[in-house]
């Protein structure tokens, strides 16, 4: 079976970014970086939700596992504050 990789919807991403921040001038590949950041965020969220489901002895990832994973934890907010200083 051949697996086709999907490309980032570049024109759609550029339109969304321009709609929210019309004053920004985007570099040639800025939309790809936004797409990559989104994919990394989604991957991390899925991993955290899977961990929460495992800790709750659930074989299925439920919405509450994802919501709990999306909430910032104490350790993450402290490290974020340290980085922003």
Image (cartoon, rainbow, N blue to C red):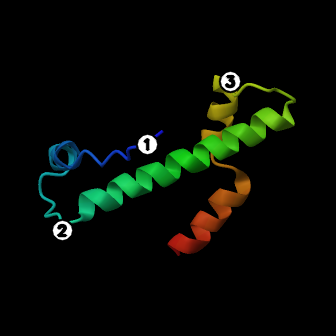
Spatial CA distance of label 3 from label 2 is 39 Å
Image vertical order of residue 21 relative to residue 60, above or below: below
Which callout, 1 or 3, points to the residue nearer the camera? 1
Q: Which mark is residue 2?
A: 1
Judged from the image, the secondary structure of the residue bearing numbered disc 3 is: loop
First of labels 1, 2 by sequence position: 1
Spatial CA distance of label 1 from label 2 is 33 Å
First of labels 1, 3 by sequence position: 1
Quarter of the image where one finds residue 9: top left
At 25% from the left and 63% from the top, the residue drawn is: 30
Residue marked by disc 2 = 27
Q: Position of residue 55 (x, y in %)?
A: 85, 37
Image vertical order of residue 2 relative to residue 67, above or below: below
Q: Position of residue 28 (x, y in %)?
A: 17, 67
Image vertical order of residue 70 relative to residue 29, above or below: above
* Residue furthest front as drawn: 1
At 21% from the left and 49% from the top, the residue drawn is: 10
Q: Which mark is residue 62?
A: 3
Judged from the image, the secondary structure of the residue bearing numbered disc 2 is: loop
Q: Position of residue 32 (x, y in %)?
A: 30, 59
- Residue 60 versus residue 48: which sits nearer the camera? 60
Callouts 3 and 2 close, C-beta under 8 Å: no
Q: Residues within 10 Å of mark 2 (few under 14, many from 20)?
A: few
- Residue 18 versus residue 28: which sits nearer the camera? 28
Which callout, 1 or 2, points to the residue nearer the camera? 1
Q: Residues within 10 Å of mark 3 (few under 14, many from 20)?
A: few
First of labels 3, 2 by sequence position: 2
- How many marks on residues? 3
């Amino acid at each position: 079976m051949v697996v086709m990789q999907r490309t980032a919807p570049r024109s759609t991403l550029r339109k969304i970014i321009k709609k929210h921040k019309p004053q920004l001038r985007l570099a040639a590949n800025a939309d790809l970086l936004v797409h990559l950041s989104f994919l990394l965020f989604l991957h991390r969220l899925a991993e955290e939700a899977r961990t929460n489901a495992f800790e709750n002895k659930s074989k299925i990832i439920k919405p509450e596992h994802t919501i709990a994973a999306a909430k910032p934890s104490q350790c993450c907010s402290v490290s974020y504050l340290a980085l922003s200083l």
